Image (spheres, grey):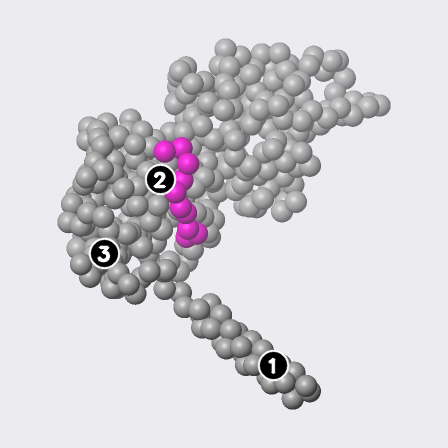
Amino acid sequence: MITAMTNRLQRYFILFIVLFIAIFILGCDKTPVGYDELGRDISNPVFIEFRSSSRYCYGKYIPLGTADYIVLGRNSEYESRVLIQFPLVDSALGQVTSAKLILYPKRHRNIGFSVHPIAKSSEWKENNATWIRMDEAVPWISDGGDFYPIDVKQQATVTSDSWVIELNRNKLDTLVNHSYGMILIPDSSDQDFATVYSKSNSNKSPKIVLQYSNITKTYLSMQDCHIIDTLNLNLLPLDLWVGAGFVFRTMCKFNLDTIPDNVTIAYAELVLPVQSHASISDTFDIAVSKILEPIYPNYPHQTRYADNISSKTQYLAATDTVVILDVRKIVQFWNKYNGENSQPDSNFGVLVSVYPENYEISRVQLKTGSIKPYLKIGYIMPPSRRY
């Protein structure tokens, strides 16, 4: 009896070992169920490069009032002015013993500048103001802001921690009762840019401090932004630029008709060789978005593109000579509606830009000669069948 029980246990043990080995082998097999019976063979990816069939680039003024930092300065290519408005009220201005505008720099530079009252009638809005417009559909009388030709700054103490600008007390009535804020204009001799915190930073918001004989009143910024213009920058017909502050956008379209139908897009990268760059910061992001309609050759700035970006990558100004963006999702979308599934053509191209576009000042020039932007795609053919 003991021998029979022992034999039975041995058989159970052997059966357990065999079952364990079978489960292990099956668990390691990643082949789809039924694959061997169909006799399929998965091919290696086929890689192909496409040069752009058409390219466009344009520059545009955009509102910068949502930026975390406001830019002040000038060089041979750009000028940036600062607009600020405070909720000042006429409260015994004749008794003010000192009036100070205080700014907190993020990027400290010894920038020379003047401070002028903005004309009372020029009711600018920070979310819409640009170099050429005070509001969404209202232009400045003079590009760059409407202001009175009086400098209300007496002196300034500029340090890495704060800028303290002593204001002319004799001009306080103009600032309080006869203006719509103030504008800071960099000296024409400057060749650099400083950045200061905007009102979005509650601890370092621009402020005006009025000192009376026995009290101090502090007013925080209620509106602030910077407005940017380009100087001596001429965008030629073949140029491809991307930039922030004063924005530059590049659009490229690729003819993908040679890609076979029903393939799987496994890889897609937009490759952008860099010619040159100019920027305040050492790093910034470059992004790509899907264009939603045919590009208007004579009015490329009116072409609609997706609000959301498909991908972005960080650009290191000191070292990067090429920008590579993952556009697999976009190409997969194009391929989905190609061939038999074709709807109105989905492939209108891609838009390349700096992200976010209100981030300080930057510009990248892409190469356009024999080495120019191209699209590299890897696709996999459908598995073959035995029958």
Q: Is residue 98 magenta?
A: no
State the SS at label 2: strand
Q: Amino acid at mark 1?
A: Arg
| Neighbours of disc 3 within 10 Å: few (<14), some (14-19), many (20+) | some
- Outermost residue on the right side: it is 214
Indicate whether 114 appears above or below 242: above
* Residue 122 on image: x %, y %: 49, 14
- Mark 2 vs mark 3: which is more N-terminal? 2
Q: Which mark is residue 289?
A: 2
Q: Is residue 163 visible?
A: no
| Neighbours of disc 2 within 10 Å: few (<14), some (14-19), many (20+) | many
* Residue 238 on image: x %, y %: 19, 42
Q: Amino acid at mark 3?
A: Met
Residue at the disc numbered 1? 8
State the SS at label 1: helix
Q: Amino acid at mark 2?
A: Ser
- Mark 1 vs mark 3: which is more N-terminal? 1
- Outermost residue on the front side: it is 1
* Cα distance between the residues tagged 1 and 2: 69 Å
For this rendering, which residue is in front, 207 or 286?
A: 286
Indicate whether 129 appears above or below 309: above
In screen coordinates, is 212 left or right of 52?
right
* Cα distance between the residues tagged 1 and 3: 54 Å
- Outermost residue on the bottom side: it is 3
Residue at the disc numbered 3? 381
Q: Is residue 309 magenta?
A: yes
Q: What segment is highlighted magenta in the picture?
A: 306-315
